[in-house]
Amino acid sequence: MDKQQSETWILQTQELLSKAYEARDFVERAAESFPTALPTHAIAIARLWQRAETLDTVIATHLETMNDGLFEGKGEVDATRGASLRALMVGQELLMYDCTWTLSWNRNTRGIIVKFSIEPEMESLHLRVENLTVAGGQDIRYPLYEDQLSDALAKAYVLEILD
């Protein structure tokens, strides 16, 4: 490992620790609604937030471009952090932590959602584009390929408009 790689790795580790402190507080709040939320999840959440920061520019830019080009800027782009349960099998649910970017329009009755999630036990990352009103969605490979994001957003837009 050369000096630059070493310095980058140390900086990333320090950043992870900083985010882990914030994530620990987040887990405490999430545990009020999700009893399976554990303090040990803070590291996975910090990793999610660290990686989400690198995705933010790409995803937010795509959604802002859609808002400007398709809705003349009348839509709303928002980003949030949260937790949710995903169905596994009948009667089983899996806790996931999410970073979500949303483009909504028509008084928030229509929208496109980009969800970046982590499963905290295995630290498995998932990236997905969903619609506000249409069931289903499209998984996107992570690390992100911009053309795949563009295609998924275009498909989600058309599905949302046709519904």
Image (tube, grey):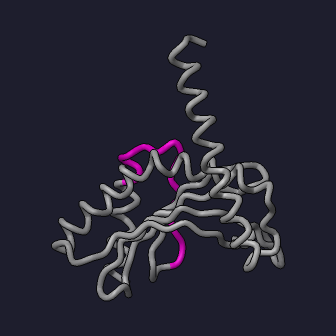
22 inside magenta stretch: no
- The quadrant in which the N terminus is found is top right
Side (left or right) of 140 relative to 82: left
Q: Nearer the viewer, residue 31 or 122?
A: 31
Number of dots carrying numbers: 0
**Which residue occupies 62% across, 47% down?**
47
Q: Nearer the viewer, residue 46 or 126?
A: 46
> Relative to residue 109, is residue 90 drawn left or right?
right
Residue drawn at x 62%, y 43% as measured from the top left: 16
Q: Position of residue 153 (x, y in %)?
A: 37, 62
Q: Is residue 68 left or right of residue 1?
A: left
**Considering the image in quadrants, where does the C terminus appear?**
bottom left
Q: Which residues are magenta?
A: 135-149
| Percent coordinates x, y for residue 65 in the rendering | 24, 60
Residue placed at 73% from the left, 79% from the top? 33
> Given the current orientation, which residue lies at the most extreme top position?
2
In this rendered view, identify the residue nearer to me: 9 or 91: 9
Tell me: residue 35, above or below residue 11: below
Q: Give x and y (percent) for residue 122.
A: 76, 49
- Asked where in the image residue 6 lies, by quadrant, the reply is top right
> Where in the figure is residue 128, as x and y percent of width and height?
52, 60
Q: Is residue 13 left or right of residue 66?
A: right
Residue sitting at x 63%, y 57%: 22
**Front-most of residues 10 and 47:** 10
Residue 112: quadrant of the picture:
bottom left
Asked if the stretch drawn in magenta spans residue 145, the answer is: yes
Q: Eyeballing the image, is 77 above or below 57?
A: below
